[in-house]
Amino acid sequence: MGVQHFTVVENGSVTVPKGFKAGGLHCGLKKTERNDLGAILCEVPATAAAVYTTNVFQAAPLKVTRESIAAEGKLQAVIVNSGNANACTGKQGEQDAYQMRDEIAAQLGVSSHYVAVASTGVIGELLKMDRVSAGIAKLPARLSSDAAGAEDFSQAILTTDLVKKEICVAVQVGGHTVHIAGAAKGSGMIHPNMATMLAFMTTDAVIDQAALQQLLGQTTDVTFNMITVDGDTSTNDMLVAMASGLAGNESLQPNHPDWDAYAAAFRHVCEHLAQAIARDGEGATKLVEVNVNGAVSDSSARAIAKTVIGSSLVKSAVFGADANWGRIIAAVGRAGEPVNPETVDIRLGDITVLTQSRPVPFDEEIALEYLKGNTVTIHVALNNGDGVATAWGCDLTYDYVRINAAYRT
């Protein structure tokens, strides 16, 4: 990985980068009193990029956001609600998403095409637009550049999440201190391409729009696209990045001398948020990491790591603290990737359970204690090439079924 050139900002959030405010409130979409409407505002039109779910059924807000970014490659605000996905809601859903965009634009005094819209929650129900509109009218007064505004926003985007997910880092670019921050939600309906979630990144870097889009896509492939909770890909996944350009650095492009340092810091933000989503998987009791090396290519390693991390049998074994390596090697073998069945090594943490595809004696009690921990790492060495990848997920528990058996009620 080399020398780490960035630092993590203590208690950092999406409002630390220069030019950004955020806030949130409860407008009545959720049955509880938790915040369910939030916004991020940049004081100038920000360079913008986004990636979206690969689900064929895409929620109305995604169409609106694509259209906004396509206009100039810039955004100045994001409006997001939780408690209702506004997905599979037909023409009325589209009209509601456009209405959200236009109303917050008017309230903030920005052009409509500078606004992104995001929604998360139950699929197939129309938004209660009277409540949304009333909330939007109150939002501008709730926006601030301090920690309280960021906290209100982070809470507003959560659904079944138990904790907020946010981070900010600082990195030097051409002698200027540049910040990169992010906030995310995601707990269930989480599966690669993308990780079913909403995530919002802010940075004060001056960066070329095409470079930001390329960086976002490449980083998503090795972070958010490498997590899974339950194998289901949402209709609403969206990751939006906004760059205010107020740090004053020379414009970042791949040939910039500090590009690698900025890209590494950017990846750290995404990786932190991705891991936080996996750790907070619905009903989860532990974070599971799968490291694959020795594959024929990185893409092959990613496919194998995703298959292992997504296996219900592997996830159940981790929940039960059962060192059942047979489930791991079975998942490796069904990933549809080139594997030499005679050369696979598997470790659970530091405990070797398989060498050259043959079992080796290990202490079951020590393995049991390791698997009872809140983080479990599975190492798979294929000894078949130079490809490497890491995927993240969580265990599969009784509570996952309880939460999803009554999601609407």
Image (cartoon, rainbow, N blue to C red):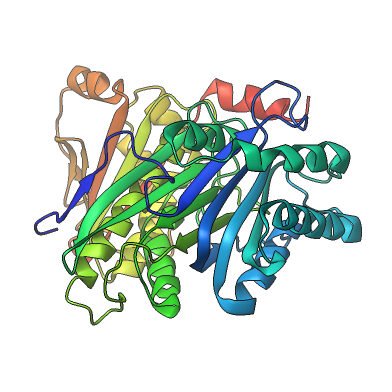
Classify residue 51 as left or right of residue 393: right
The percent position of residue 304, horizontal first and vertical second, equals: 37, 57
- Decide: is 112 above or below 184: below
Quadrant location, the N terminus: bottom left
Classify residue 83 as left or right of residue 53: right
* Between 194 and 144, the one nearer to me in the picture: 144
Classify residue 154 as left or right of residue 82: left
Does residue 334 show up? no
Determine which quarter of the picture holds residue 160: top right
- Decide: is 160 above or below 307: above
Quadrant location, the C terminus: top right
The percent position of residue 119, horizontal first and vertical second, equals: 69, 48
* Residue that sits furthest to the bottom in the current view: 255
Does residue 403 show up? yes
Q: Residue at x 88, y 39 (%)?
A: 130
The percent position of residue 272, horizontal first and vertical second, equals: 34, 44
The percent position of residue 166, horizontal first and vertical second, equals: 41, 40
Q: How many marks?
A: 0
Determine which quarter of the picture holds residue 273: top left
* Between 283 and 125, the one nearer to me in the picture: 125
Q: Residue at x 53, y 65 (%)?
A: 50
Classify residue 106 as left or right of residue 131: left
Q: Residue at x 55, y 45 (%)?
A: 190
* Between 167 and 353, the one nearer to me in the picture: 167
Q: Which residue is drawn at 30% across and 75% down?
A: 252
- Decide: is 170 above or below 24: below
